[in-house]
Image (spheres, rainbow, N blue to C red):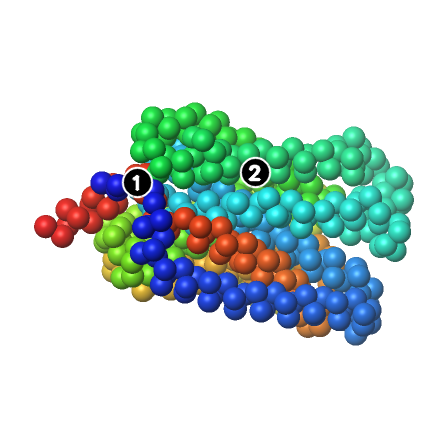
C-alpha cells in the first residue's frame, strides 16, 4: 500500500520529470516559431496564397484548426477523467495523471478561445466573417434566419461560458478539490471515491451534451447549412481516443523507469491496447457509417460536407485518414504481441495521435473553401497548431510535474505488480 502522498514520490520521479520537461521545451520552441509564422502571415497579407485571403483572415482560419485540435485533446482528457471517476478501472488509473493535467489546460483554453468568440461580434470591423452566419447578408438567407434564435453571437457566448464553467469545475472537483484524487492521496480516505462517482456519472452524460453544443457552435456552423446529429459525439470519440493514446505513450515510453515500472504489467498494457482498439472501432463506426448513410441518401443538406472532401486530392487525403485511423491500428492492435510489448504499443499510440492531427485538419480547413495545394496556407495552419500546442504542452508539463505521475490513492496496479514479482 502507498504510505501517504509526500514529497518522496516526486523525488523518485526526478529523472522522469526531467525527460518530460525536455520534450515540453521542444514543443515550446516549436510554438515560438509558430507564433513568428503567424505574425509573418499577417504582415505579408496572405497575398501569395491560392485563395487570396487577407493575412488576418488566413491566420484566423489556421488558428481555428490549431485551437480545435488542442481543445479536443483537453476535452478527451476530461472524458478520461470522468470515466476514471465513474468506472474506477485500473487502465484509467494508470493514465489519470496525464488526463488530469491535460484537462487542467481547459482553464487556459477558455482564454485562447476568445478570439473565435470575438470574431462573431466584430467581423465587420475585421473586414471578414470567419463564421458566415455573422455576416449582414445572412439576414437574406431563410435557412440562417430560421436558425438565428439559436445561432447568434450572444447565444454562442452564453453556451461558451456555461460549457467551460462546467468543464473546469469537473476537472477541479475530480482532481484538485477537497474530494479529488490529490486530496485522497493525503488522507487515504477511500470514501471520497464515491463522491467522485456521484459527480462523474451524470457528468459524463452532460459531457456528451455540452460538447455537442460546443462543436455545433464553433465547427459545424462554419458551414451553417450543413448539420449532423452525431457530430458532437464524433468529436468526443476523437478526443477521448487521442487522450488514451497520449496516456499510453507516457506509460509505455517509461515502462522500465521509475515510477512507471511500479505499475506496468502485461495485463495493464493489454487493457490499454484494448481501449485503443475499442476507440478505433468507435471512430470507424461513427466516421465511415455516417459518410455512407449520408452519401447514399444523396440529400443536399447532408452531402455538401462530403462533396467538398470526396473530390481531388482531398479524397486521397480522406483515404489516407481512413487507412491510418482505422485499418492500420485495427490490424496491428489485433495482435496480442502488440499489446504485450510496450514499445510496439507506444508506437501505435503515437501513430494514432499523429494521424488524428491530419484528421482534425481534414474536418476543419475544407470549410474555408481553400484548395488543398495551397501550401503557403497549410504552412500557416501548422504554425498556428504549433503555437497553440507550444502553450498547451508548456502548461501541461508544469501541471503534470507537480504531483506523482503514478496515482497513489488507488494501489491496485502496484499490488498486481508486486504479486507478479513473488
Asked whether the viewer can see residue 212, the reply is: no
Q: Is residue 105 left or right of residue 214?
A: left
Asked whether the viewer can see residue 216, the reply is: yes
Relative height, residue 34 to residue 238 (above, below)? below
Q: Is residue 360 left or right of residue 273?
A: right
Residue furthest bottom in the image = 48
Query: Which residue is drawn at the image coordinates 32% and 29% (left, top)?
Result: 189
State which tag comes first along the sequence, 2 or 1: 1
Q: Nearer the viewer, residue 195 or 347?
A: 195
Image quadrant where one finds the N terminus: top left
Quarter assignment of residue 382: bottom right
Quarter assignment of residue 34: bottom right
Q: Is residue 379 left or right of residue 272?
A: right
Percent position (x, y) of residue 155? 75, 33
Query: Which residue is drawn at the image coordinates 78% and 52% (left, top)?
Result: 130
The number of discs equals: 2
- Front disc: 2 or 1: 1
Binning the other alpha carbons within 10 Å of mark 2 as few (below 14), some (14 to 19) or many (20 upward) gives some
Label at residue 168: 2
Label at residue 4: 1
Q: Nearer the viewer, residue 222 or 61?
A: 61
Label at residue 250: none
Query: Which residue is drawn at the image coordinates 25% and 52% (left, top)?
Result: 262
Q: CA distance from mark 2 to mark 1?
A: 27 Å
Amino acid at each position: 500500500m502507498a504510505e501517504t502522498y509526500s514529497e518522496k514520490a516526486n523525488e523518485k520521479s526526478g529523472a522522469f520529470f526531467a525527460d518530460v520537461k525536455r520534450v515540453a521545451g521542444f514543443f515550446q520552441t516549436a510554438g515560438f516559431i509558430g507564433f513568428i509564422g503567424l505574425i509573418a502571415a499577417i504582415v505579408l497579407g496572405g497575398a501569395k496564397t491560392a485563395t487570396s485571403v487577407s493575412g488576418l483572415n488566413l491566420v484566423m482560419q489556421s488558428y481555428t484548426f490549431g485551437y480545435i485540435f488542442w481543445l479536443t485533446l483537453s476535452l478527451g482528457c476530461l472524458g478520461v477523467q470522468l470515466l476514471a471517476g465513474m468506472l474506477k478501472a485500473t487502465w484509467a488509473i494508470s493514465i489519470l495523471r496525464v488526463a488530469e493535467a491535460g484537462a487542467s489546460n481547459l482553464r487556459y483554453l477558455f482564454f485562447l478561445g476568445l478570439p473565435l468568440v470575438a470574431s462573431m461580434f466584430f467581423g465587420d470591423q475585421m473586414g471578414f466573417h470567419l463564421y458566415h452566419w455573422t455576416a449582414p447578408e445572412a439576414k437574406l438567407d431563410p435557412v440562417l434566419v430560421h436558425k438565428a434564435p439559436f445561432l447568434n453571437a450572444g447565444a454562442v457566448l452564453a453556451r461558451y461560458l456555461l460549457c467551460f464553467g462546467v468543464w473546469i469545475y469537473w476537472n477541479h472537483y475530480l482532481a484538485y478539490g477537497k474530494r479529488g484524487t490529490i486530496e485522497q492521496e493525503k488522507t487515504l480516505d477511500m470514501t471520497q471515491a464515491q463522491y467522485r462517482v456521484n459527480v462523474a456519472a451524470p457528468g459524463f452524460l452532460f459531457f456528451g451534451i455540452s460538447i455537442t453544443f460546443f462543436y455545433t457552435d464553433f465547427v459545424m456552423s462554419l458551414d451553417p447549412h450543413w448539420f449532423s446529429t452525431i457530430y458532437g459525439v464524433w468529436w468526443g470519440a476523437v478526443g477521448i481516443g487521442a487522450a488514451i493514446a497520449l496516456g499510453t505513450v507516457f506509460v509505455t515510453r517509461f515502462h522500465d523507469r521509475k515510477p512507471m515500472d511500479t505499475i506496468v504489467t502485461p495485463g495493464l498494457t493489454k487493457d490499454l491496447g484494448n481501449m485503443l482498439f475499442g476507440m478505433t472501432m468507435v471512430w470507424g463506426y461513427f466516421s465511415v457509417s455516417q459518410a455512407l448513410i449520408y452519401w447514399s441518401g444523396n440529400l443536399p443538406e447532408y452531402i455538401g460536407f462530403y462533396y467538398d472532401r470526396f473530390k481531388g486530392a482531398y479524397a486521397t487525403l480522406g483515404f489516407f485518414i481512413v487507412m491510418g485511423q482505422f485499418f492500420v491500428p485495427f490490424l496491428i492492435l489485433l495482435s496480442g504481441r502488440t499489446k504485450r510489448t510496450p514499445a510496439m504499443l507506444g508506437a501505435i499510440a503515437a501513430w494514432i495521435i499523429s494521424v488524428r492531427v491530419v484528421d482534425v485538419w481534414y474536418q476543419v480547413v475544407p470549410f474555408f473553401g481553400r484548395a488543398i495545394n495551397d501550401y503557403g496556407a497549410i504552412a500557416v495552419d501548422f504554425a498556428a497548431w504549433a503555437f497553440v500546442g507550444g502553450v498547451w504542452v508548456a502548461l501541461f508539463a508544469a501541471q503534470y510535474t507537480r504531483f506523482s505521475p503514478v496515482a497513489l490513492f488507488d494501489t491496485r496496479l502496484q499490488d498486481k505488480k508486486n504479486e507478479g514479482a513473488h
